[in-house]
Image: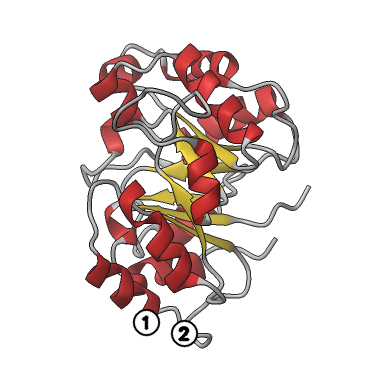
Amino acid sequence: MALTPLIAGNWKMFGSRAMASRFAEGLTPAALPTGPDLLICPPAALVGLVASLFAGRGVSVGGQDCHAKAEGAHTGDTSAALLADLGARYVIVGHSERRADHGETNATVRAKAMAALAAGLTPILCVGETLAERDAGQAITIVRSQLQDSLPDGATAGAVVIAYEPVWAIGTGRTPTVADIAEVHAALRAVVGDGVRILYGGSVKPGNAAEILAVANVNGALIGGASLAASDFLAIAAAAPTA
């Protein structure tokens, strides 16, 4: 099944109003590729502004995380419903930095994905192994277990996106081999079936995007540092194959 690639940028804890404005200025009709869907996930405080700046420019907006509850006494957290109200269409859940820095378990990630679906958002569910787990030959077992235990009810084709991000490749400049990526994505495909987009993330940049995006079962990319400038983000998007 041909799936429209999704090129998603995760700004992490970077960004400002000025940066968002500069990025929006780079989203000219001439610069936008026609093939993939495009998405930027800024920090929560910028979601509303970015949604406003990007309106009509061909790029959707998402959140980087959400709480599992729709509302309540959860100081500092952001609900999926609020993200949707601000103009978001997607939300990242289970990123390795959330799992590592905040102790999020598969059960936590699943609850957040359920909250995203209930709010009308598409969760981008992240999985990935550490270097120690890969060196121990456990990569496939780890990512399959994370996926199976984190998938929400209602994870039908089109309702959820999966992102494979090997923890050891995020922000390091290192990437798995094409064969490694193909092996993991095939294992994830066996769990979710056809119709669910599976993104690759981990040091994706303009110079390696075409090779990565051509791998079987890779339906787009989740990009960190290379998504902070519109020119780099759009160069990666231009490398996506036509569905």
Q: Residue 104's image quarter?
A: top left
Amino acid of disc 2: Thr
Q: Secondary structure at mark 1?
A: helix
Q: Nearer the viewer, residue 103 or 48?
A: 48
Q: Residue at x 23, y 47 (%)?
A: 13
Q: What is the residue that sits farthest to the front in this orientation?
A: 73
Q: Secondary structure at mark 2?
A: loop
Q: Nearer the viewer, residue 75 or 211?
A: 75
Disc 1 packing (10 Å; few <14; some 14–19; many ≥20): few
Q: Is residue 167 visible?
A: yes
Task: Please determine whether, in this image, residue 77 is positioned above or below residue 137.
Answer: below
- The residue to which callout 2 is attached is 28
Amino acid of disc 1: Glu
**Which percent across, then down, holds residue 121?**
60, 42
Q: Is residue 226 left or right of residue 198?
A: left
Task: Please determine whether, in this image, residue 15 is positioned above or below residue 90.
Answer: below
**Which percent across, then down, holds residue 215?**
55, 48
Q: Residue at x 26, y 16 (%)?
A: 132
Instruction: Give the Cα distance between marks 1 and 2.
Output: 7 Å
Q: Quadrant of the C terminus?
A: bottom right
Q: Residue at x 72, y 43 (%)?
A: 158
**Label 1–label 2 contact, CB within 8 A:** yes
**Which percent across, then down, holds residue 165?**
40, 35
Q: What is the residue that sits farthest to the right in this orientation?
A: 1
Disc 2 packing (10 Å; few <14; some 14–19; many ≥20): few
Q: Residue 119's image quarter?
A: top right
Which labelled disc corresponds to residue 25? 1
Q: Residue at x 44, y 34 (%)?
A: 66
Which labelled disc corresponds to residue 109? none
